Image (spheres, rainbow, N blue to C red):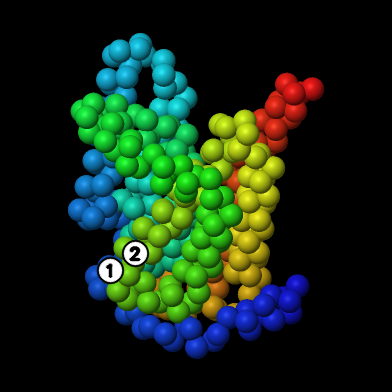
């Protein structure tokens, strides 16, 4: 197995690790009490999203009654998605991601695989529309409905972008470059979230629309999950350090760099695949129900 993993990593240029040099962050490493990232680039969008959702939900439930139109479960899913975003970007993963590859991978997988399906399960677009004045909501609907619907039907491109984003940003050179440049680091986080929202929006359409093609959704989920598992296995079983940029950083927080890399691989390989398995099983149930109704 280790020989196979070694051969696979030969395909990734060894020079990528030296594509950028990221210095070790100044100051003491974070603790759980100090691992806060209070950046306006993160806090303002999160706050705006929360306020918009709360305002729209209040209006909907005021007109229709609590739990009608949007269920408590859907609201709970959105709240869980917001907590996941907070864990990834505010506390504690973002601070620890500068020192540990395992936290870096956990942050990425949260943005790509966990937060997007939870947020979309809360029907954020419909609720955000309810928060806006009627004319604004109608205008946005006319302008955005067609392009957003087109994106939601483009499952294959969404799956390709989903997988490509995961692979490209986890190349050693790309990781080092993102750690060395703040703007590139923000772009990396944004690309994970955008890729995740696009893919999961296309999958949700397969769940909610009877004629959207549940089988295609299953194929896409399995394909993405296999890529994620394969990359996780590469990190777990690699016999040497693949991310030299994290060598000194891991030592600063008391982690063995190779064990930290193995933990990162396990996080990507096992728990990160859970959302794909859960939604895949949900698709199977929906498909069986539709077949029974037709029969």
Would residue 57 be found to the left or right of residue 15 on screen? Answer: left
Image side of residue 66 versus residue 120, left or right: left
| Picture coordinates of residue 114, whole percent (x, y) | 49, 46
Q: Secondary structure at mark 2?
A: helix
The quadrant of the image that shows the N terminus is bottom right
- 68 to the left or right of 1: left
Q: Residue at x 54, y 38 (%)?
A: 205
Marks 1 and 2 sit apart, C-alpha to C-alpha, by 6 Å
Residue 35 or 187: which is nearer the viewer? Answer: 187
> Could you say which disc has been placed on residue 132 in the image?
none
Query: Residue 182, how many percent across, how many down?
Result: 28, 69
Q: Residue at x 41, y 46 (%)?
A: 147
Residue plotted at (28% across, 31% down): 138
Q: Check disc 1: other Cα within 10 Å, few if <14, some if 14-19, many if 20+.
A: few
SS assignment at label 1: helix
Q: Is residue 214 visible?
A: yes
Residue at 40% from the left image edge and 76% from the top image edge: 176
Q: Is residue 106 above or below residue 45?
A: below
Screen quadrant of the C terminus: top right
Q: Is residue 166 visible?
A: no
Give the labeled residue for mark 2.
187
Residue 183 is marked as 1
Up-down relation of residue 49 to residue 68 (above or below): below
Label 2: few (<14), some or many (≥20) within 10 Å? few
Is disc 1 in contact with disc 2, using a CB cutoff of under 8 Å? yes
| Image location of residue 33, percent across then percent down | 30, 51
Residue 24 appears at what percent x and percent y?
Answer: 32, 76
């Amino acid at each position: 197995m280790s020989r196979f993993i070694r051969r696979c990593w030969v395909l990734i240029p060894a020079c990528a690790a030296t594509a950028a040099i990221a210095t070790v962050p100044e100051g003491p490493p974070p603790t759980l009490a100090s691992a806060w990232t209070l950046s306006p680039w993160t806090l303002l969008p999160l706050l705006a999203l929360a306020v918009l959702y709360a305002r729209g939900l209040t209006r909907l439930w005021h007109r229709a009654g609590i739990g009608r139109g949007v269920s408590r479960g859907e609201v709970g899913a959105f709240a869980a998605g917001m907590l996941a975003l907070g864990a990834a970007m505010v506390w504690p993963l973002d601070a620890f991601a500068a020192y540990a590859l395992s936290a870096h991978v956990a942050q990425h997988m949260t943005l790509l695989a966990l937060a997007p399906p939870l947020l979309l399960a809360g029907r954020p677009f419909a609720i955000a529309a309810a928060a806006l004045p009627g004319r604004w909501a109608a205008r946005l609907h006319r302008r955005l409905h067609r392009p957003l619907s087109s994106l939601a039907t483009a499952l294959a491109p969404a799956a390709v972008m989903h997988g490509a984003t995961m692979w490209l940003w986890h190349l050693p050179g790309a990781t080092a470059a993102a750690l060395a440049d703040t703007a590139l680091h923000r772009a990396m986080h944004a690309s994970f979230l955008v890729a995740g929202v696009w893919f999961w929006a296309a999958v949700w359409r397969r769940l909610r629309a009877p004629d959207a093609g549940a089988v295609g959704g299953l194929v896409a989920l399995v394909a993405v999950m296999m890529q994620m598992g394969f990359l996780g296995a590469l990190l777990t079983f690699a016999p040497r350090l693949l991310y030299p940029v994290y060598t000194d950083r891991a030592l600063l927080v008391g982690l063995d760099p190779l064990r930290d890399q193995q933990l990162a691989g396990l996080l990507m390989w096992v728990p990160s695949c859970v959302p794909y398995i859960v939604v895949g099983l949900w698709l199977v149930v929906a498909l069986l129900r539709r077949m029974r109704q037709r029969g």
